[in-house]
Amino acid sequence: MLVKRNAYKSACKYTRRMRVNAPHFPDLTQKIQQLKKEKKALILAHNYQRPEIQDIADYIGDSIELSRKAMTEKDAEFIIFSAVDFMAESAAILNPTKKVLLPSTGARCPMAQMLTVDEIKRVKAKYPKAPVVLYVNTLAVCKAEADICCTSANAVEVVNSLDADTILFGPDKNLSEYVAEKTGKTLIPIPANGFCPTHLLFQSEDVKVLKMQYPDAEVMVHPECTKGMRLVADFIGSTSKICKQAKESSAQKIIIGTECGILHRLQKENPTKQFYLAYDGAVCPNMKTTTLERIYQSLKEEKHLIKVPQATAKKARISLERMFEVKT
């Protein structure tokens, strides 16, 4: 295997190519900021978004962090959610008085698409007494079928809060395995093999090669990674927890096992530390469909409004609110 370059540079070459094709970033950024003030809009960006989008966002974080943040912004009339479909849906469910816009209609999460209502009902019929816990990385129609939702940050606490030893958990099989290991409970994945295509790219062999080059580096990976990756990790956590751990760690070199977009935030918050992506090609193309041009167009024309049917939103909100009640 070829020697890895500094991953912050190599993993972001995808974004740099886009920068070359958009020399008008400063002007466009200024236009977005002006339009944002006029329309009382709030720009939210997930940790995996392009650097230039993170730089103009009011808040950066994981999906539920951002949705909850939007709930505290009472004066905002519009929410520009720079992420993927299920995240914008959650924001719309939790902020019914605000207009939520998804700048790119192509920003769909492949893993969320893997779970259907029919599959939930089919497995539920086999285990009628088992509660249904759904990762927030699901569509609203599926959340409406859940007893409670969870994030990668609080999945262990949510499962431990339930008075049940057998639990239906979807849609990520790797997260399901991780939670089962931590709780000792039986988690039945729905669907049987749901996964995040980007996190599946990470392999433990790549980490071992990097550790030969940087033996003192701390390895931080997302629980959507495979068990092999989790076994070579020093720390396993959500994007928000990885950011927190990176700040608190005494390590000066850190190997990261999650989508490359997070490196921009990590480097800004920890300028004296070096970050290496465990696999240089870990880019979520769905997250990267959002551009400054699309944000500007969406806000200017108020297009791509996210609407969740009232009956679905009501049931899905219950499963989300139950998650917020769990102490972490």
Image (cartoon, helix red, strand yellow):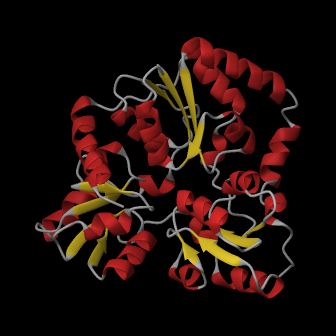
Identity of the residue drawn at 59% across and 20% down: 299
Q: Can residue 278 be seen from the camera position used here?
A: no
Q: Residue placed at 65% from the left, 45% from the top?
A: 49
Residue 251 in the image, given as x and y percentages of width and height: 72, 74
Residue closer to the observer: 7 or 109: 7
Looking at the image, the residue that sits furthest to the left is 129
Q: Position of residue 137 (x, y in %)?
A: 43, 53
| Residue 106 appears left or right of 70 | right
Q: Is residue 107 above or below residue 283?
A: above
Determine whether, in the image, residue 127 is placed left or right of residue 321.
left
Q: Position of residue 228 (x, y in %)?
A: 56, 84
Residue visible at 33% across and 32% down in the picture: 308
Q: Is residue 8 above or below residue 166?
A: above
Q: Is residue 35 visible?
A: yes
Quadrant location of the C terminus?
bottom left
Q: Quadrant of the N terminus?
A: bottom right
Q: Nearer the viewer, residue 272 or 231?
A: 272
Q: Return the x and y of residue 19 as percentages of the image width and height.
A: 83, 40
Count up the numbered dots: 0
At a point 58% along the width and 15% down the height, the residue shown is 301
Locate residue 162 relative to residue 285 in the image: left or right: left
Q: Name the one closer to the observer, 140 or 106.
A: 140
102 horizontally vs 192: left or right: right
Height in image: 238 above or below 82?
below
Quadrant position of residue 231: bottom right
